[in-house]
Image (cartoon, rainbow, N blue to C red):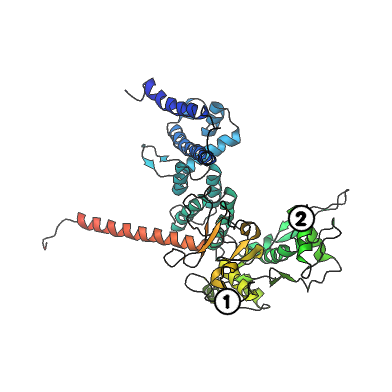
Amino acid sequence: MTPDDPAVRQRVADSLLASVDRLVDTPLTPLLDEDLIQLVRDVECVVRRLAGFGHQVLAQVSQRSIPARVGAAGVSRFLVETLNISQSEAAARAKAAEELGPRIDMAGEVHPPLLPATAAAQAEGAITAEHAQRISAVMKRVPGSVDNPEFEAVEKLLAEHARTLSPRDITVVGEKILAYLDPDGRITDDKDRARMRGITVGPQRADGMSAIRGELSPTLRALWDAFIAKYARPGLNNPDDPDSPHGACDFVDREAMVAAAIRDTRTVAQRQHDALLALLHPQTRVDALGEHRGLPVSMIMTVSVEDLERKTGVATTATGGMIPISEVLRLAEHADPYLMVFDKQGLPLHFARKRRLASAAQRMALTAALRGCTRPGCDAPASMCAVHHVTGWSAGAATDVGNLTLACDHCHALINDGPNSWKTVVLGEDSRYPGRTGWIAPPHIDPTGTPRVNHRHHPGELLARALSRIHHRNHRDLSRHGEWLKDQQPPTDSD
């Protein structure tokens, strides 16, 4: 049979539709809970893989000029007319096919996709179409061309992250990677940031409210985050609750704080508004902002000696922000520096105490080393985290910095002795990340029980590893090509 035979054209569609018919006719009630959970995974995997296969189909549609042949102005318009979908959906699919589908030249030769690692992950069913869209948006801002090793490394890294992170998280990770790639201001520099800074308060409306918009500099954002982390906590500075603690609230009874948080129905935006109101209130002393999770409400920046010497790169803050080194040096003129010594894995060498609660020095060490919550995928900064004993204090473990880690309140609550809880371990010397906190997900998330680390706060470590692999591969390929050229040389008389 030839490709033009109707039986050949129909067989693929019939096979697919018949499988779907059998699936939708399957009764779900008899399934066990574990089987139903696996079915949810399997259906999602099929949907993702079909989306990836759709890119191949559209690549053929485009290469054969089918839209022009049927009178449609481009692939997206062809999809609108053929599938009865919206123009925005059609445009998104056409764009995705250009980036994730095989590239077919005029001679019919097939080339890899523009985003090969992303395309491969979607073809496996490991990531969604939205993951791919977020990766594409980040890649458009990566300096250089697609032939740049950094471009390839970032795309591989984002595709790897997308297998375990949400689409929204990919944007967050992408911003951190872009900042890591841009230490010398190739994307933006101090002048750009100074030009963009500003806050505008609109005119007061008839209802008394005023709109606010603006662009915060990295320094102001870091200071704002440090302040908000404490003053905008649930239950604090609530004008609707006469019993709500106001101000720094350092010496308020814990039970009163918990009760106020339970009564608090404000949104995050409303809590931030009320925190600013409390700060500007005449009764508030700005020189007495108190402590937050055992540390003074202040900006904590972590910077490497190498970046300080080069005067390039970025510093990380306890609230998850990034500040250019040039601004760090200006701020350091009025700061009290701390020297923290780390091992080759980037972990504090030693800080221990006999009490259960971590000291301020230990918390600062963890902030500098871990930067935020250590549960895989969590982006909570150190300012929003509690200190957690990896091996419990009740089990006889010491309050040693090697047995301490950071976990935000939400993730901390996931750790217990129940069957669907998370577990934490300190990874051994044979691990790729010795000394780091490994989190073991419950069986319904990861049936293998593999300990995993959180790379969200350390974009440089995976990017550096990816670049190293690419440079090693390129060097190997170049050496092989040189050997091949040598073999092609005709023998000389001396041979």
- Name the secondary structure under disc 1: strand
Percent of width and height locating residue 275 = 78, 61
Q: Which residue is mark 1?
A: 352
The one nearer the camera, 204 or 120, is 120
Using the numbered discs, state the Cα–Cα distance from disc 1 to disc 2 in whole angstroms. 35 Å
Local packing at callout 2 (Cα closer than 10 Å; few below 14, some 14-19, many 20+) is few
What residue is pinned by disc 2? 262
Q: Considering depth in this image, is 278 or 187 the residue closer to the camera?
A: 278
User: Earlier along the polypeptide chain: callout 1 or callout 2?
Assistant: 2
Q: Nearer the viewer, residue 482 or 433?
A: 433
Q: In the figure, is residue 345 to the left or right of 200? A: left
Dots 1, 2 in contact, CB < 8 A: no
| Residue type, numbered disc 2 | Ile
Q: Which mark is residue 44?
A: none
The quarter in which the N terminus is drawn is top left
Residue with the most extreme front position: 395
Residue neighbourhood size for the residue with mark 1, other residues' Cα within 10 Å, grouped as few (<14), some (14–19), many (≥20)? some
Q: Is residue 321 visible?
A: no
Residue 115 makes an appearance in the image = yes
Q: Looking at the picture, does residue 477 appear above or below residue 119?
A: below
Taking the spot 51% from the left edge, 33% from the top edge, the residue there is: 75
User: Residue 109 appears at what percent x and percent y?
Assistant: 36, 39
x and y percentages locating residue 72 in the rendered image:
53, 28
Task: Give the amino acid type for the residue marked by disc 1 in the picture.
Answer: Ala
Q: Residue at x 47, y 39 (%)?
A: 49
Q: Nearer the viewer, residue 67 or 97?
A: 97
